[in-house]
Image (cartoon, grey):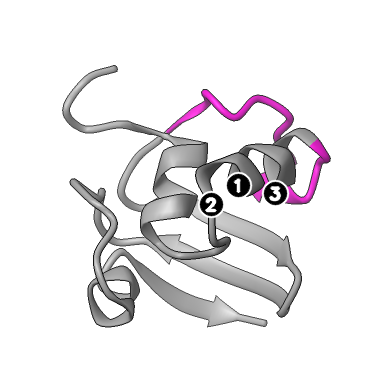
């Protein structure tokens, strides 16, 4: 994947929307994620900065704009730098 895109499941894991990458993959496969308003079922779908994600997670529904792509899974503060919440 190019440097300006990242796999959706990997980004969700870096941004700490679930505890494991497997859980992130299942979340996408189960249709609980929308990318720019379209339901996504492919965990390998590439996302980029500026994309809007709607995520139905265990702790609630979050609408967030991608502000950064992760390089590794860090602490909660680092995870929050990857997105901006625009609705819930």
The residue located at (40%, 62%) in the rendering is: 15
Q: CA distance from mark 3 to mark 1?
A: 10 Å
Q: Quadrant of the N terminus?
A: top left
Above or below: residue 22 compared with residue 55: above
Label 3 secondary element = strand
Residue 1 falls left or right of residue 55: left
- Residue at the outermost top position: 1
Magenta range is 30-46
> Which badge, 2 or 3, comes first in the chain's sequence?
2
Identify the disc placed on residue 33: 3
Based on the displayed image, in which of its 4 quarters is residue 10 positioned? top left
> Which badge, 3 or 1, comes first in the chain's sequence?
1
Residue 47 falls left or right of residue 79: right
Crowd band around label 3 with a 10 angstrom C-alpha radius: few (<14), some (14–19), many (20+): many
The residue located at (34%, 40%) in the rendering is: 48
* Principal secondary structure, stretch drawn in magenta: loop
| Residue 88, position as x, y percentages in the image | 67, 82
| Residue 3, position as x, y percentages in the image | 16, 27
Is residue 39 a member of the stretch shown in magenta? yes
| Residue 34, position as x, y percentages in the image | 69, 47
Of tags 3 and 1, which is closer to the observer? Answer: 1
Label pair 3/1, CB-CB below 8 angstroms = no
Residue 1 falls left or right of residue 84: left
Label 1 secondary element = helix
Residue tagged by mark 2?
A: 20
Residue tagged by mark 1?
A: 24
Label pair 2/1, CB-CB below 8 angstroms = yes
| Residue 39, position as x, y percentages in the image | 76, 39
Question: Do we see residue 24 in this rendering?
Answer: yes
Q: CA distance from mark 2 to mark 1?
A: 7 Å
């Amino acid at each position: 994947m190019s440097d300006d895109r990242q796999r959706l499941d990997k980004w969700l894991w870096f941004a700490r929307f679930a505890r494991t990458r497997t859980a992130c993959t299942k979340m996408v496969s189960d249709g609980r994620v929308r990318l720019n308003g379209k339901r996504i079922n492919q965990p390998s779908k590439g996302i980029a900065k500026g994309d809007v994600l709607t995520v139905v997670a265990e702790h609630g529904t979050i609408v967030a704009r991608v502000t950064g792509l992760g390089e590794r899974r860090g602490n909660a503060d680092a995870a929050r730098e990857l997105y901006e919440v625009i609705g819930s």
